[in-house]
Amino acid sequence: MKTPCRIFILFFITIIISGLNGCSSSSDSPMEQENYLYKGSFIDSPVKGIEYQTQTQAGITDSQGVFSYSLGETISFYIGDIKLGETAAGPVISPVDLIKDACDETHPHVINIARFLQSLDYDNNPENGIDIKPQIHDRAYEYSISFEQSIQDFENDYQVFDFFDDLNKNNNFPDKNRWLCSAEEASQHLGRNIGNTETPGNDQDSGGGDSGGDSGGDSGGGDSGGDSGGDSGGGDSGGDSGGGDSGGGDSGGDSGGGSGG
C-alpha cells in the first residue's frame, strides 16, 4: 500500500511543478518582448541621414529611412541641433506624426517640416528619396529653427533664411543656390508617399541598446552599429549623428533638440 501511495504523491507533485513552470514561462514573455528591437521607417520619401534617439537607441536613418526602437518608447528626430519633433515609436513615422494635433499633410506645421526636409535633399529630387548629408548637420548646430509657426512666418524666419544662405555659401549642394521648395509642392509630395511605404521587416532582434542604430549611410567614422556606407563629411550628434556622410564621433544625448546659435 505504501508504494502506490508514494507513486500517487510523486505524480501529484510533478503536475504542480509543471503548472508552475508553465506560469513562469508565460509571465516572462512580456518582459522578453520588451528587449526585442523593432525596425521602423521615417518617410516623406524615405529619409536618409536624420538622427534619431529613443530611451535605449540612437542612430542615423539609412537609405530606407529605417531606425531601431523598443516597444513603448518615444522617438525624437534631429538635424544637428534642430529638432524635427518626437512621437511614439512605431513601424512608419512621417512629419504628420511629429505634430500632435495634425491629422494629415495639410497641417501648416507638417508642411514646414516637409518643406525643410525636401529642400535639404542633396540632389534636390525627393522623388528618389531624401538624402541629408552630414555637412548639413554640421551647419545645423549653429541654428535654432521652430516648425510650429505659420507657413508664411516659417518662410520669413531669419533663422531659416540664414541657414540656407550659409549652406549655399559653403557649397553644400550640387546646385549652387537652394531655398525652400513651395508649400504646395511639399504637401503634395508628402501626401503621395503617406500610406505607400512598406513596413520594415522585424526579426525582433533581442538585446539591449543598439547604440549605433541603423546608421544612415555615407559615414566614415563615428556610428556604432547600423547600416552605414559611403562618403566622408562632418561630425555626428544627437544619437548616431551626422546625417550620413560623417567623419566625426557620435554623441548619444537627447540634448540637441532645438538649441543652437
Image (cartoon, rainbow, N blue to C red):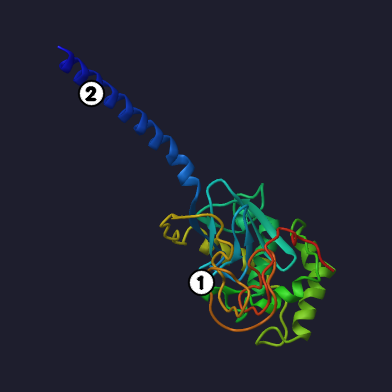
Q: Residue 11 — which label?
A: 2
Going by the numbered disc 1, the residue's amino acid type is Asp
- The residue that appears at 80% across and 65% down in the rendered structure is 144
The local secondary structure at tag 2 comes to helix
Residue 173 location (% of width, % of height): 67, 84
Q: Residue furthest top?
A: 1
Residue 247 location (% of width, % of height): 65, 80
Dot 1 alpha-carbon crowd within 10 angstroms: few under 14, some 14 to 19, many 20 or more: many
**Which residue is nearer to you in this view: 18 or 218?**
18
Mark 1 vs mark 2: give the one in front.
Answer: 2
- The tag earlier along the polypeptide, 1 or 2, is 2
Where is residue 238, by image quadrant?
A: bottom right
**Which residue is nearer to you in this view: 154 or 236?**
236
**Which residue is nearer to you in this view: 13 or 231?**
13
Residue 145 location (% of width, % of height): 78, 64
- Report if the CB atoms under discs 1 and 2 are less than 8 Å apart: no
Distance in Å between CA atoms under marks 1 and 2: 54 Å
Residue that label 1 marks:
227
Where is residue 253, by image quadrant?
A: bottom right
- The residue that appears at 75% across and 80% down in the rendered structure is 167
Counting labels gives 2
The local secondary structure at tag 1 comes to loop
Q: Is residue 78 above or below residue 207?
A: below
- The residue that appears at 56% across and 45% down in the rendered structure is 72
Where is residue 7, by image quadrant?
A: top left
Dot 2 alpha-carbon crowd within 10 angstroms: few under 14, some 14 to 19, many 20 or more: few
Q: Quadrant of the C terminus?
A: bottom right
Q: Residue furthest front?
A: 2
Going by the numbered disc 2, the residue's amino acid type is Phe
Residue 203 location (% of width, % of height): 41, 57
Q: Quadrant of the N terminus?
A: top left
